[in-house]
Amino acid sequence: MKRLGAIAALLTLGACQPAGEVPLLISDLEVTPPRPGMQMSAGYFSLRNNTAKSIVVTRVDSPQFGAVEMHETTTVDGVSRMRPIESLRVEPGATVTLERGGKHLMLMRPADTLDTVVLNFYADETLLLSVAARPGDDPA
């Protein structure tokens, strides 16, 4: 399966950090391309909080998709259910991983071409992180 690998990140979180250290770091980004005839993709990655305060992601959007939702898959008594989650909290110094079978992004109603995908992460109206991805091999 072809993956979209991260090529750039712009961090705008206004936290005081030691020189060269970013407040919120994304790694292992994978955006699955929509399957033929489908109108959905998924996003998986790890987010690391390098600050001394909790960071709460309240929404994610993308100009290449009509809607982006944060979801979580849970299994109870052998039945898997996928439900939207309102926010994603990353505690100080912690990493939150979005992965298959757990928390993930649902990217719905894609544009005609997905040469580049931009994901914008927000805390309310504050842009925390903007990541651009393009088709390619697995991220290094």
Image (cartoon, rainbow, N blue to C red):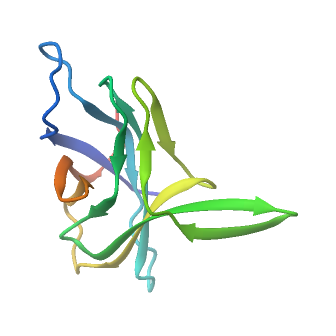
Answer above or below: position of 4 versus 114.
above
Where does residue 71 sit, x and y in percent of width and height? Answer: 51, 63
How many marks are shown on the rendered structure?
A: 0
Tell whether 70 sits left or right of 132.
Answer: right
Answer above or below: position of 70 versus 100.
below
Residue most toward the right? 77
Q: In the image, what residue occupies the spot 45% across and 32% down?
A: 95
Q: In the image, what residue occupies the spot 28% across and 34% down?
A: 24
In-front residue for pair 57/64: 57
In-front residue for pair 15/63: 15
Where does residue 109 sit, x and y in percent of width and height? Answer: 33, 81
Q: Image quadrant of residue 36?
A: bottom left
Residue most toward the front? 53
Where does residue 82 sit, x and y in percent of width and height? Answer: 61, 69
Q: Image quadrant of residue 42?
A: bottom left
Q: In the image, what residue occupies the spot 68% across and 70% down?
A: 81
In-front residue for pair 114/101: 101
Tell whether 99 sits left or right of 62.
Answer: right
Q: Image quadrant of residue 106?
A: bottom left
| Residue 138 visible here | no
| Residue 13 visible here | yes
Q: In the image, what residue occupies the spot 44% across and 63% down?
A: 86
